[in-house]
Amino acid sequence: MTKIAVVYHSGYGHTEAQAKAVARGAGKVAATEVQLLTSEEAQQNWEALNTADAIIFGSPTYMGSASAQFKAFMDASSGIWFNRGWKDKVAAGFTTSASQSGDKLNTIVQLTIFAAQHGMIWVGNDLLPGNNSSTGSVNDLNRLGGFLGALAQANSDQGADVAPLQSDLLTAEHLGERVANITRKIRG
């Protein structure tokens, strides 16, 4: 059984929708158990992360970086870091913001560095960028062109029942499935 934990913070529900899509994708892979935890719940259940084969991190992008709530989770993991508890676990990440760019790349880089400091193996997005040509559309997977992780955009005046777009959620789902497949290959 491959165990995957999805740890996220969501201020308005948009990143939670993305987290659920990531979990749904990972759950498509046979013999995979997925646990969805908020960053606050994860700090009360380190064992779920310590026993996971992969951890997928998600945070909204606020003011150009991960949310303070998610950063608190990152900082609280320092004891695990010191003991190399997550070394060689698979990792990936996702983020959403209101703007098309919104400096989401900085958040994904922050999550990547966090995983690297823990000695984890980062899995990026393998989808070619969508919506990059005159024949493209916002309905294309990876419409925001992210390779380090799954990116989503949610209009600030729309709730999580409408935003992010389905294409962004399907991109997140694809990332979850990719992580589960790669984790199975690595773990045998």
Image (cartoon, helix red, strand yellow):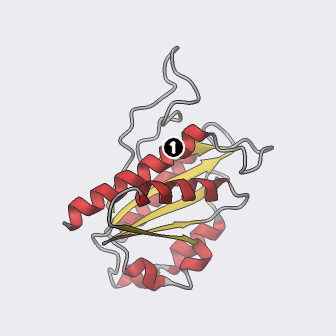
Residue at x 58%, y 72% (from the top left corner):
39
SS label for mark 1: helix
Task: Locate the C terminus and report the quarter of the image it occupies.
Answer: bottom left
Residue 136 appears anywhere in the view: yes
Residue, disc 1: 170
The residue that appears at 22% across and 67% down in the rendered structure is: 187
Type of amino acid under label 1? Leu
Q: Residue furthest top?
A: 134
| Res 112 visible | no
**Residue 67 rendering spot, x and y as whole percentages:** 64, 62
- Number of marks drawn: 1
Viewer-nearest residue: 114 or 37? 37
Q: Is residue 53 above or below residue 95?
A: below
Specify the quadrant that holds the N terminus. Answer: bottom left
Q: Against 14, is 45 above or below?
A: below
Percent from the top left, x then y, of residue 120?
Answer: 32, 66
In this orientation, which residue lies closer to the viewer: 20 or 50? 20
Q: Residues within 10 Å of mark 1 (few under 14, many from 20)?
A: many
